[in-house]
Image: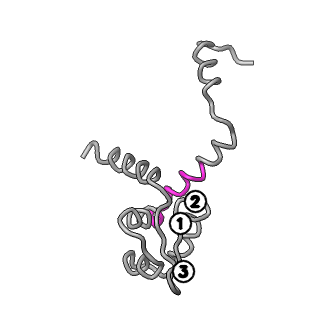
Amino acid sequence: MMKLVNPEAVEKCKVNMICEADVDDMSLIFDMFSDSTRLKIMNALFVSELCVGDLAALLQMSTSAISHQLSSLKKTKLVKTKKIGKNVYYSMADEHIEKIYQMTYEHIKEDD
């Protein structure tokens, strides 16, 4: 066993560690932020709900590529859907993800 330099600090951290299942769930959320297409989709959906065709036109990508990314975002419950007629409209599930997005954007712009 390793000798602890600061056992009090280690114990304090140990008591405040989140469970492994929650770490795994958080990891999935951060994974959604690791793709530039998903970030662009989220950026658009923060502004307005959109269907796949509108997102494809906006991002100048194929509908299948957009659908693939939306599927990932939906699996992680970051986006929700609403069907109107034959169209399915996507929107962000809640404001928490937008806060993470905005804080990240502000962070990268700090040194500009």
Q: Where is 91 relative to 22, above or below?
A: below
Q: Dot 1 lies on which element?
A: strand
Tell me the crowding category of disc 3: few under 14, some 14 to 19, or many 20 or more residues within 10 angstroms, Cα based. Answer: few
In the image: residue 108, left or right of residue 91 = left
Tell me the crowding category of disc 1: few under 14, some 14 to 19, or many 20 or more residues within 10 angstroms, Cα based. Answer: some
Name the residue that disc number 1 marks: 80
Give coordinates of residue 111: x percent, y percent: 27, 42
In the image: residue 79, left or right of residue 56 = right
Q: Are marks 2 and 1 in contact (CB under 8 Å)?
A: yes
Q: Where is 52 relative to 22, above or below?
A: below
Q: Nearer the viewer, residue 31 or 97?
A: 97
| Alpha carbon separation for disc pair 1 and 3 | 18 Å
Q: Nearer the viewer, residue 62 or 46?
A: 46
Name the residue that disc number 3 marks: 64
Q: Are marks 1 and 3 in contact (CB under 8 Å)?
A: no
Labels 1 and 3: the sequence-earlier one:
3
Q: Nearer the viewer, residue 83 or 76?
A: 83
Extreme residue in the bottom direction: 86
Residue ID at (54%, 80%): 64
Residue ID at (53%, 51%): 30
Looking at the rendering, the stretch of residues picked out in magenta corresponds to: 27-38
The quarter of the picture where residue 14 lies is top right
Q: Dot 2 lies on which element?
A: loop
